[in-house]
Image (cartoon, grey):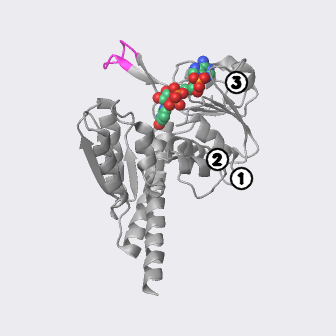
């Protein structure tokens, strides 16, 4: 049976490190890393994500601010809120929870976030930096969490054939770019598959590492992987289950029971990739704070001299 890569345990370990670093940073500079989350409307799932992010930021000894706006907020008003946060020295990371209501131009809002405060890593400037292999970029959180999981669980992707199933801008594509970078967590040989891939099983059977980011249960089955493969299941699918007291449960994109019989290691759902995503948001916020404080110090030095 496969080893289970425990995302909750890894996330707790990294959050402990981040908290210590944030406290040291506060002692040295008097500044707490500041994360602002902006939620427009009352979607229950988005509301829950934003609360979890705020709680995680508080637990890491960050300064956190949650801004909730009504669902009919006009585009210009939201733009004004983002611009205010861009100029606010207490805030180093800005997260605008997606999806946004239809009266709002989502791309324009994401582009309005200062690239220095774009802790989600979705700004085109940061996407471009990722594509050219910039080590310093604020990388999207789910892909960054996957890479961190692989490295910390002893499954370094270096030199391995990784098949990423899914080509979204949030997971598949940025993950492929991270895995292709030179250095820690990178240096993999990457294949990206999607709904038009002719023979998915032929691709995944050749993989040392399979990452499934599709959004459809049982996309990856036991017959589709080779013995000893490492499997990262990003999928998060709610399925009906009358035997569960809630009437539903969460499953990934991988047939967990079948694949774990042949894999060397696998992530569970829930408790795999999910906890790592928020952890990487905290890491990006701390990193953004460090750079902004260092940048402000340099700017003051220039003015003073
Ligand atoms: P998208 O719907 O944006 O992308 C899904 C991708 O899967 C597309 O590229 C699509 O191909 C591809 N695909 C669909 N069907 C098949 C198929 N039969 N064979 C091969 N490829 C297929 O989803 P996301 O990337 O946003 O999310 C993927 C999953 O990960 C979802 O379940 C989501 O909930 C979960 N997720 C979990 C996170 C976490 O923190 N745990 C964070 C983000 C996402 P095409 O491009 O051709 O349409």
Residue at image mark 3 = 225
* Element marked by disc 2: helix
Residue at image mark 1 = 182
Q: CA distance from mark 2 to mark 3?
A: 29 Å
Residue drawn 41% across the image and 37% down it: 106
Q: Nearer the viewer, mark 2 or mark 3?
A: 2
What percent of the width, then of the height, locates residue 224? 69, 20
Relative vertical location of residue 57 with respect to residue 179 in this rendering, above or below: below
Residue drawn 65% across the image and 43% down it: 177
Q: CA distance from mark 1 to mark 2?
A: 12 Å
Relative vertical location of residue 187 with respect to residue 5 in this rendering, above or below: below
Q: What numbered label is drawn on residue 131?
A: 2
Relative vertical location of residue 300 with respect to residue 14 in this rendering, above or below: below
* Element marked by disc 1: loop
* Element marked by disc 3: loop
Tell which quarter ligand 1 is in: top right
The residue lying furthest to the bottom in this view is 305
Q: Residues within 10 Å of mark 2 (few under 14, many from 20)?
A: some
Q: Nearer the viewer, residue 175 or 26?
A: 175
Residue drawn 43% across the image and 52% down it: 282
Q: Residues within 10 Å of mark 1 (few under 14, many from 20)?
A: some
Magenta part of the chain? 240-248
Q: Nearer the viewer, mark 1 or mark 3?
A: 1
Asked whether residue 30 is drawn in magenta, I would say no
């Amino acid at each position: 049976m496969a080893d289970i890569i425990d995302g909750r345990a890894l996330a707790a370990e990294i959050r402990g490190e981040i908290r210590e670093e944030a406290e040291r940073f506060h002692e040295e500079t008097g500044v707490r890393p500041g994360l602002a989350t902006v939620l427009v409307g009352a979607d229950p799932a988005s509301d829950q994500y934003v609360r979890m992010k705020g709680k995680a930021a508080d637990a890491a000894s960050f300064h956190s601010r949650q801004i909730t706006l009504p669902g009919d907020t006009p585009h210009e008003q939201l733009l004004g809120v983002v611009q205010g946060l861009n100029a606010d020295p207490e805030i180093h990371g800005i997260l605008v929870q997606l999806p946004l209501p239809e009266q709002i131009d989502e791309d324009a809002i994401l582009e309005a976030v200062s690239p220095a405060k774009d802790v989600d890593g979705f700004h085109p400037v940061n996407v471009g930096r990722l594509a050219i292999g910039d080590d310093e970029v604020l990388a999207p959180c789910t892909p960054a969490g996957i890479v961190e999981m692989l490295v910390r669980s002893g499954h370094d992707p270096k030199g391995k054939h990784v098949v990423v199933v899914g080509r979204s801008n949030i997971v598949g594509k940025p993950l492929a770019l991270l895995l292709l970078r030179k250095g820690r967590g990178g240096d993999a040989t990457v294949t990206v598959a999607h709904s038009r891939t002719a023979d998915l099983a032929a691709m995944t059977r050749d993989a040392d590492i399979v990452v499934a980011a599709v959004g459809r249960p049982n996309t990856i089955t036991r017959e589709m992987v080779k013995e000893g493969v490492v499997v990262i299941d990003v999928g998060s699918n709610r399925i009906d289950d009358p035997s569960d007291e809630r009437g539903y449960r969460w499953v990934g994109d991988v047939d967990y029971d079948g694949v774990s019989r042949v894999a060397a290691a696998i992530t569970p759902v829930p408790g795999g990739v999910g906890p790592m995503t928020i952890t990487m948001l905290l890491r990006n916020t701390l990193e953004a704070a460090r750079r902004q404080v260092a940048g402000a110090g340099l700017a003051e030095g220039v003015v003073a001299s």
